[in-house]
Image (tube, coloured by chain):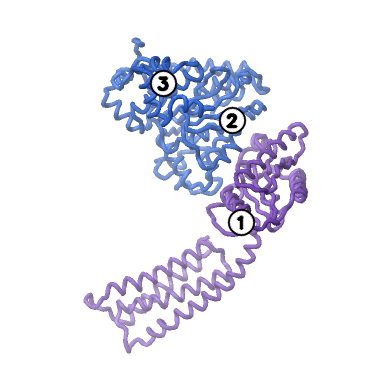
Amino acid sequence: MNSFHHERTWLELQDKFIPAHWQPAILLDLMLQHEFNSHKLLHGTSIFYDDLLDSQLCISAEQYFKFISNCRKLYPGTDLSFRYGQRLLPGTYSDYSYFLKHASSLHGAFQLLEKFGGILSPLLRPEYFIEQGRCGLIWRSGFGQTSEHVFICEAMLAATREFFRTQSGIQFPWRYELDYVEPSYMEQYEVNLGGSVSFSRAVTRMFVDSQFLHQPWPSGSDNVYLRGLQKHSSLSHQKSQDGFIYLVNKLILENIRHGIDLDWLAVELGLSPATLKRKLKRHHSQFRWLLDTARLETAVHLFKAEGFTNEQVASYLGFYDEANLRRSFKRWTGMSPSDFLSSLC
Amino acid sequence: MLGLHKKWCLGICVVVYGQLLINALLTTNKTWNELDWLDILGEGGTALLILLWLYFILAARPGGRVTNLMGAGLLAFFVGVFQDALDEIFHMGASTPWHSVVESVASPLGMILMTVGLYFWRQEQGVVNRQLKKREKLFRQHQLVDTVTQITELNYFKYHLRIALSAKHVKRKFTLLLLDINQFNRVNQRFGNAEGDRILHAISELIMLNLRDDDLLSRYAGDRYAILLANTIEAEANVIGQELIAAIEHFAFKTLQGERVRLAASVGLACAREDSVDSILMRAKQALALAKQQTNSSALGQLVAV
């Protein structure tokens, strides 16, 4: 286990770090275009319409969630998240958009999206992955599962799909795996996301075959995009952009082999166990639940990508024996490991 | 809508206030012991509800003859009921003969005006229905109208498709078209998403103009439309599909900046067989996917039937 500790920083639900005139303003514009009342849209968010136009104002994840929830309730259709997403990237978010527009391949775009995730997708952090001939983005919740989770996933998937497609001119055959149950409006996924979609998975992600990874894009400029990555490394000692749940999830995943518990996590974060519990509760989460999800994600990865046997996975995750793993799998997914894996196609 | 009816709002205030004032001046109050609260609640509540109806009518309708008749009818009806309610609070008797006149004349008068208003409203609705026919077909359910294009959304379409598929008339063939705008993301990219929404709205109007009275148009999702062609065999549907492609190709849409937008569409077509809603939609989708593939090589609109 890593014995070297430095002080960790993170963002919580009430921390104001999302520039209101960037992504939230796009949603507001979209709603105002349909003549919804701005007072109703901002009701209960403690944001004032006039302040939103002010380029100084930052809002918290909590305020953003509430605003999204208001919009969802007022908007009559099922396509709001997708329409909102299609307006998000590359966006006009100062340098960040500039660098993103010059990504010269999927590889470059994935890197930039991951590095600037706190800005380009503040509520749902993208994480670049390559495994077994596939590459793509894993989307991780920054501030816990809320009732807006599905909306935010739909928006960010639509945003990136639209961005990759227009920027490259390539029709990527995306495959999507989503960590929520199938909604009733599949036609929106069909038209707005394309590709194949499966629901109730361990983690939300989108991916294509690795052959597309380095295929050059016409609008790219290595020069500019590499400067973007450099800018990131000079920024990295500044304040963390990691949401509390994102950070907790990351720590759990990194240490999943070591039989971790709540007390360990509390020490790792420099909090008392009681404070940690309270913070998790405030983010609609529980340690047990986060640990189970991380174990499931790791188990699926080991089975699929690394070709582990039941026994190997059980020992990797610190289960007493194979039967214990099977029992846990049943609890997580309602299926045995082999049934769950075959349902993954 | 209520902003259009300033005169009506003022008039209603004057009537309610005036009626209350006249009664208060010309009669004497009942004492607390004389009040029958159940009657006050029942009759007063009825009067208030009529005012609420009046509000709904005015808030929902533009001005004009029908609105005025219904408004006047409800107002007169209100005066009658309200007068009836007031005799629970004020002493009415031989000294106030006007009380029973107002009570017995105003309500029937209101009913008559309301009836005439409803008669003309029915005529007006006939005209509106003819305009809406292709958009809504059998019934009206305002939750099912799409926000961007103002045509019905897919759930309504599926409902209708289910009815059409379960109809017993074997001879009644119908055909399902799926129409998709080619490379619409480029349009959004070039002209902006707000302009893209305007285009989708305009295209839905354009398609509507090219359809027959019995056909139903609906927004599938994004830049895709679903069209139900009633009593249509494949050959006829082919012609209509080609007409739609040609119409969209020749459509000279202008952005707010005055730029001409060039558009092309692909169509997938499926004739009804022994089908379920999902299976016929699936066949139309396959046809559309094929049409889109061919489009990529020729840049012109394509139509494929399955």
Q: What residue is rendered at 66% in x and 26% in y?
A: A170
Q: Is residue B16 above or below residue B281?
A: below
Q: Check the picture and name the quadrant holding the C terminus of chain A.
A: top right
Mark 2 vs mark 1: in front: 1
Task: State the CA–CA distance, disc 3 to disc 1.
Answer: 51 Å
Q: Dot 3: what SS?
A: helix
Q: Are marks 2 and 1 on the same chain?
A: no
Q: Is residue A318 above or below residue A246?
A: above
The colour chain B appears in is: purple
Residue wearing tag 3 = A250
Residue wearing tag 2 = A161
Judge the density around disc 2: few (<14), some (14-19), many (≥20) Cα neighbours within 10 Å: many
Q: Amino acid at mark 3?
A: Lys
Residue wearing tag 1 = B136
Q: Amino acid at mark 1?
A: Glu
The colour chain A appears in is: blue
Q: Check the picture and name the quadrant holding the N terminus of chain A.
A: top left
Disc 3 chain ID: A
Q: What residue is rendered at 64% in x and 21% in y?
A: A220
Disc 2 chain ID: A
Looking at the image, do the residues carrying marks 3 and 1 touch, with CB atoms under 8 Å apart? no
Q: Are marks 3 and 1 on the same chain?
A: no
